[in-house]
Image (cartoon, helix red, strand yellow):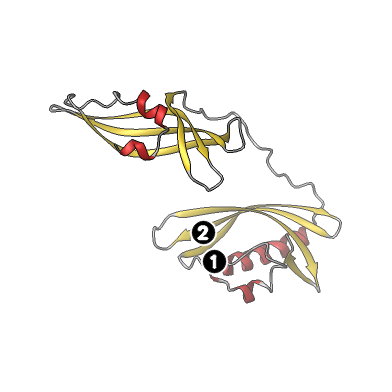
Amino acid sequence: DALTGYLTEDLQRLTADTVKSDVAVSSSVQDVQIWSVEQNGGENDFAVVFTVAQTISDDKKKDTVSSVYKTAVHKDDNGDMVITQAPTITGKPAKSAYTPKAAEPDGTVSAAESEDIADFLTTFFTLYPTATEKELSYYVSGDSMPPVKCADYVFSQLKSTVLNKDGDTVTATVAVEYLDSVTKMTQISQFELVLKLVDGNWKIIK
């Protein structure tokens, strides 16, 4: 009965006998992970790949099983959705061998500029978790770095910084280490920023 709110009528008929009441096994869903949602055919049709982890119980034991399925969903112009394909077994996406090209310094930023920019970034990222929009305006042009209001984050260090100059701007690829004062975990945030000297002071412009 519950499935009538999700499946087309044809699918309801097709799957009517898949859950049998006379089997002495019960299951409960522990987790659902969506791997991908992609357009499939029409503009309002989507293919969804997902994993379901279930605990299967009988009178003697409990087992946790994880299965990967692909299904199809139609979304109409009102935003209402219906499943149009029975969840069909499929393979789990594997880890890709892709490795993005690492940023490398090209020697265009002098040692003095590097030190000056490092001081600027250290000051900025120390203030950033709690900075107001007005405070950020001293360091940022526009809204490229909106306020985050993460009072629990305490700046630890610049983990890595790569600087490259192009005309009057410098691209800074930086990893920033914060300590979460509540969870006590270390959090690494990565940024790619464009800096420019404005009235003698560095400013983030993008």
Would you identify the image quadrant in which residue 15 lies?
top left
Label 2 residue SS: strand
Task: Please identify the quadrant where the C terminus is shown.
Answer: bottom right
How far across and down, in percent of the image, does residue 75 sit?
52, 41
Task: Identify the residue shown where x is 48% and y is 45%.
Answer: 80
Q: Nearer the viewer, residue 142 or 11?
A: 11
The residue to which callout 1 is attached is 129
- Residue 164 is tagged as none
Label 1 residue SS: helix
How far across and down, in percent of the image, does residue 161 sit?
66, 53
Q: Residue furthest left?
A: 59
Direction from residue 139 to residue 83 in the image, left or right:
left
- CB of mark 1 within 8 Å of CB of mark 2? yes
Direction from residue 34 to residue 14 in the image, left or right:
left
Q: Nearer the viewer, mark 1 or mark 2?
A: 1
Q: Residue furthest bottom?
A: 134
Marks counted in the figure total 2
Q: Residue furthest right?
A: 167
Q: Amino acid at mark 1?
A: Pro
**Badge 1 density bin: few <14, some 14–19, many ≥20, Cα 10 Å:** some
Q: Nearer the viewer, residue 75 or 160?
A: 75
How far across and down, in percent of the image, does residue 204 sit?
72, 64
Task: Identify the residue shown where x is 78% and y is 63%.
Answer: 196
Image position of 106 with respect to 6: above or below = below
Q: CA distance from mark 1 to mark 2?
A: 9 Å
Task: Identify the residue shown where x is 13% and y is 28%.
Answer: 59
Q: Amino acid at mark 2?
A: Tyr
Q: Nearer the viewer, residue 144 or 5?
A: 5
Direction from residue 51 to residue 144 in the image, left or right:
right
How far across and down, in percent of the image, does residue 108 sit?
82, 52
The residue to which callout 2 is attached is 178
